[in-house]
Image: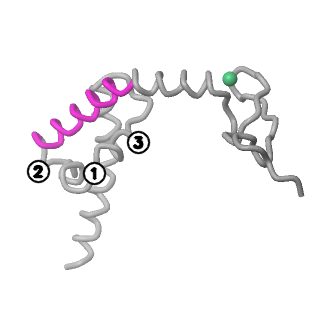
Amino acid sequence: MKLPYWGESISPTAIRCKECGVIYTSNVPKYCETCLKRGEEAIRKSLPLAQTLVDAVKAHAHKNYEKDGWDYVVESYEDKEIWEEIAGCKTPEKAIKKMHGIVSMLDDRRKDIEATAY
Ligand SMILES: [Zn+2]
């Protein structure tokens, strides 16, 4: 077996970038370097919005701690988990509404369990 030179990849694979279709050789799958960089930029740009929405949901949860299961958000959701639940929401109002649907479902289930416990 021929040993590779320094910097030479042992198994260079030609990959077609999923985004722009450019053929590149790398061990990094799916996207060429340009598209990877562009993707990271897009994520970085969307972060302030994500944080704004997550903060709005958290503030609402604190204010309504006693109501509709919002305590779940305060007690057991991390920012990242909140963001996953509200992904796709563009405004704080929509994010809160979406999260409300989730926590009120959890709250209903908790009430059911409490009701059958006695
Ligand atoms: Zn590309």
Residue under pointer 1: 77
Using residue 25 as the reference point, say whether residue 2 is left or right of it.
right
Q: Does the magenta stretch mainly form a helix, a strand or a loop?
A: helix
Figure quarter occupied by ligand 1: top right
What amino acid is at disc 2? Glu
Give left or right: position of 84 versus 2. left
* Residue bearing the label numbered 2: 66
The CA distance from mark 1 to mark 2 is 16 Å
Q: Nearer the viewer, mark 1 or mark 2?
A: 1
Give the quadrant of the C terminus. Answer: bottom left
Q: Is residue 73 above or below residue 99?
A: below
**In 3D space, how far apart are the residues under numbered discs 1 and 3 (Cα atoms)?**
10 Å
- Callout 1–callout 2 Cβ contact below 8 Å: no
Q: Earlier in the sequence, mark 1 or mark 2?
A: 2
Q: Secondary structure at mark 3?
A: helix
Q: Residues within 10 Å of mark 1 (few under 14, many from 20)?
A: few
Q: Secondary structure at mark 2?
A: loop
Q: Residues within 10 Å of mark 2 (few under 14, many from 20)?
A: few
Contact between marks 1 and 3 (CB within 8 A): the answer is no
Specify whether residue 70 is painted magenta.
no
Segment tinted magenta in the rendering = 46-63
Q: Is residue 56 magenta?
A: yes
Q: Quadrant of the N terminus?
A: bottom right
**As drawn, 12 above or below 34:** below
Instruction: Tell me where residue 101 appears, x and y as whole percent.
Output: 33, 43
Amino acid type at mark 3: Glu
* Residue 52: x %, y % from top left: 26, 27
Residue 77 location in percent, x, y? 28, 51
Q: Which residue is mark 3?
A: 84
Q: Which residue is at a point 71% across and 20% down the rendered structure image?
A: 20
Could you tell me which residue is drawn at 21 percent across and 31 percent down? 56
